[in-house]
Image (spheres, helix red, strand yellow):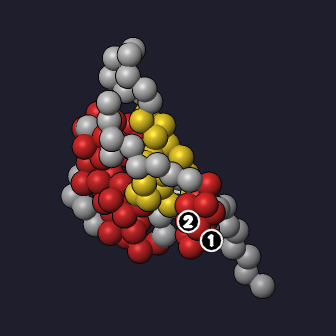
C-alpha cells in the first residue's frame, strides 16, 4: 500500500490562502486491487512556467512543473514513473492563457 500523507480540509484551505488555486489530481494505480493515487498541486505561476519552458524536453518540463507545484498527497505519485507522468500531463493543462485583444486607439 502506498504511503499517503493525510491531507485535511484545513491544509487545503491554507494552501488556497497561500497559492490561490489548488488542484487535486487522481491517477489510477497499476492493478485492479490498488487504490487511486491522489496528489494536490498549486497552479503554476509565470516563474515556474518560465523554468519549465527552459528545459530541453517535455519530460524535464513536466518534472519541473511537478516538483514546483506539488503540495502533498500519495508519495507514490512522485516515485512511480507512470503515475508521475499521468499527473504531469494534467499539470500541463492547468495554466491556460486568457484570450486578449488589441485595439489601436
How crowded is the residue under tag 2: few (<14 C-alpha within 10 Å), some, or many (20+)?
Answer: some
At horizontal 44% and vertical 30% (from top left) the residue drawn is: 36
The label number, if any, that marks residue 34 in the structure image: none
Q: Secondary structure at mark 2?
A: helix
CB within 8 Å, label 1 to label 2:
yes
Q: Quadrant of the image for the N terminus?
A: top left
Q: Nearer the viewer, residue 97 or 20?
A: 20
Estimate the spatial distance between the alpha carbons at disc 1 and disc 2, rounded to whole Å.
Answer: 5 Å
Decide if residue 22 is on the left or right side of residue 62: right
Residue 16: x %, y % from top left: 61, 65
The label number, if any, that marks residue 15 in the structure image: 2
Q: Is residue 48 above or below residue 58?
A: below
Q: Secondary structure at mark 1?
A: helix
Residue 37: x %, y % from top left: 42, 36
* Residue under label 1: 17
Residue 21 in view of the camera: no
At horizontal 48% and vertical 69% (from top left) the residue drawn is: 45
Decide if residue 2 is on the left or right side of residue 10: left
Amino acid at each position: 500500500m502506498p504511503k499517503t500523507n493525510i491531507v485535511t480540509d484545513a491544509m487545503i484551505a491554507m494552501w488556497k490562502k497561500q497559492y490561490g488555486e489548488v488542484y487535486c489530481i487522481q491517477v489510477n494505480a497499476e492493478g485492479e486491487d490498488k487504490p487511486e493515487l491522489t496528489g494536490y498541486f498549486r497552479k503554476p505561476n509565470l516563474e515556474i512556467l518560465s523554468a519549465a519552458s527552459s528545459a530541453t524536453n517535455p519530460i524535464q518540463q513536466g518534472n519541473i512543473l511537478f516538483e514546483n507545484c506539488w503540495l502533498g498527497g500519495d508519495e507514490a505519485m512522485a516515485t512511480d514513473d507512470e503515475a508521475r507522468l499521468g499527473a504531469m500531463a494534467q499539470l500541463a493543462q492547468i495554466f491556460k492563457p486568457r484570450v486578449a485583444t488589441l485595439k489601436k486607439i
